[in-house]
Image (spheres, rainbow, N blue to C red):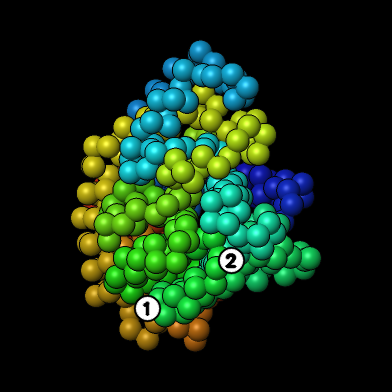
Amino acid sequence: MTERSAEFIAADERYGAHNYHPLPVVVASAEGAWVTDVDGKRYLDFLSAYSALNFGHRHPALMAATLEQLARVTLTSRAVHSDRFGEFAEKLAAACGLEMVLPMNTGAEAVETAIKTARKWGTDVKGVAPGAAKVVVCEHNFHGRTTTIISFSGDDSARAGFGPYTPGFVTVPFGDTAALDATLADPDVVGFLFEPIQGEAGVLVPPAGYLTSVRELCDRHNVLMIADEIQTGFGRTGATFACDREGVTPDIYCLGKALGGGILPLSAVVARRDVLGVLTPGTHGSTFGGNPLACAIGIAVLDLVATGEYQERSRILGDHMHARLRDELAPGIVREVRGVGLWAGIEFEPTAGTARSYGEKLLERGVIAKDTHTYTLRLAPPLVIEKHDLDHAIDALIESTA
């Protein structure tokens, strides 16, 4: 680490709350799949800000939309209409195959909004007694770190010490349709909130047919299917949404991260009209949710997604990445490689060292990747990455584990 980098890191450590454990690199600029530190050294970004940068850093179309809107108006609040929100909502609803959009800012806000919506729907439409509604969630889930969300979190580091916890949640094993069927039979259950692929847990992929079964069970028990596609959405898995991989549409999508193009926080709940229609003026809101600047960026993101180019890149390059990881990583060091599209979780044998140690070795070789749950390293390069850059990063990983 250079003296210049050390100065920036020292200021971060002194004045910033220690709720993250960053890798020792100080990024000063970025473009596409590459970032450059304060000393001019370049790194391949294999984290993509946890999939917020699916379209890379400073994508030209997204930057153009941002600059054009900055010159006009950035914020109105939804106390009045803007000329950007209607177009954004229409395009997002169409992309999801649903009817109504409620914009927020962060992914956690989208999840909180979905929970509120499901409870209100349960009371007003399903007929559950006020205060009795239950939402079913999965073991090892990660949906954010707000007080309500950590009440049912599968991540002890996010949950421990922050009680008392919010009631109204029931946990089932991820991928277990028999357990889900039995739990949804409770007439007080109003929603099933789940990640189609569990990202923070280490890119855990459920059994084939799971999403189809979830759709059938939610229909059978009159329960809202709530898909948290905040990390999986907008091309990461080789489809626009992970639910598309099995041809199912949830009742509610929770979306975020890549929707803001890596420029602004932008999230949304997208649902059928009879579901989001239970909200009326005063029941929910956000000063910045649906602001004109974020909507302009979201429109540009949806235009990129509509081409299908990024989903195809994720499929083709993802197949290549997974084949190399399966075939070339050193045996005895890696326990399992999981994932789909340009998304992978590499779980190391505990005897081989922590995933953090391999992330630090990768950093020395000019690649940024981050660990989760001690022994899993996540790979999520921007979907704009070139094949030779992808191979360069995989070569660096193989060297790091040799």
In the displayed structure, would residue 248 be above or below residue 208? Answer: above
Residue that carries the numbered disc 1 in the rendered image? 336
Residue 181 in picture, x, y percent from top left: 44, 75
Q: Secondary structure at mark 1?
A: strand
Q: Which of disc 2 and disc 1 is earlier in sequence?
A: 2
| Quarter the N terminus occupies | bottom right
Residue 275 in picture, x, y percent from top left: 49, 46
Total count of labels: 2
Callout in the foreground (1, 2):
2
Furthest residue in direction front, as rendered? 127
* Residue at x-position 54% and y-position 51%: 125
In the displayed structure, would residue 134 be above or below residue 53? Answer: below
Q: Quadrant of residue 4?
A: top right
- Kindly identify the amino acid type of the residue bearing the numbered disc 2: Asp
Residue that carries the numbered disc 2 in the rendered image? 188
Mark 1 and mark 2: Cα distance apart in space:
39 Å
Q: Are marks 1 and 2 in contact (CB under 8 Å)?
A: no
- Kindly identify the amino acid type of the residue bearing the numbered disc 1: Glu
- Around disc 1, counting alpha carbons within 10 Å, would you say few (fewer than 14), some (14 to 19), or many (20 or more)? some
Task: Examine the rendering and report whether any part of residue 66 can be seen.
Answer: no
Task: Examine the rendering and report whether any part of residue 202 can be seen.
Answer: yes
* Residue at x-position 24% and y-position 75%: 327
Residue 50 in picture, x, y percent from top left: 48, 53
In this image, 141 relative to 378: left or right?
right
In this image, 122 relative to 164: left or right?
left
| Quarter the C terminus occupies | bottom left
* Residue at x-position 66% and y-position 63%: 132
- Around disc 2, counting alpha carbons within 10 Å, would you say few (fewer than 14), some (14 to 19), or many (20 or more)? many
Residue 258 in picture, x, y percent from top left: 43, 43
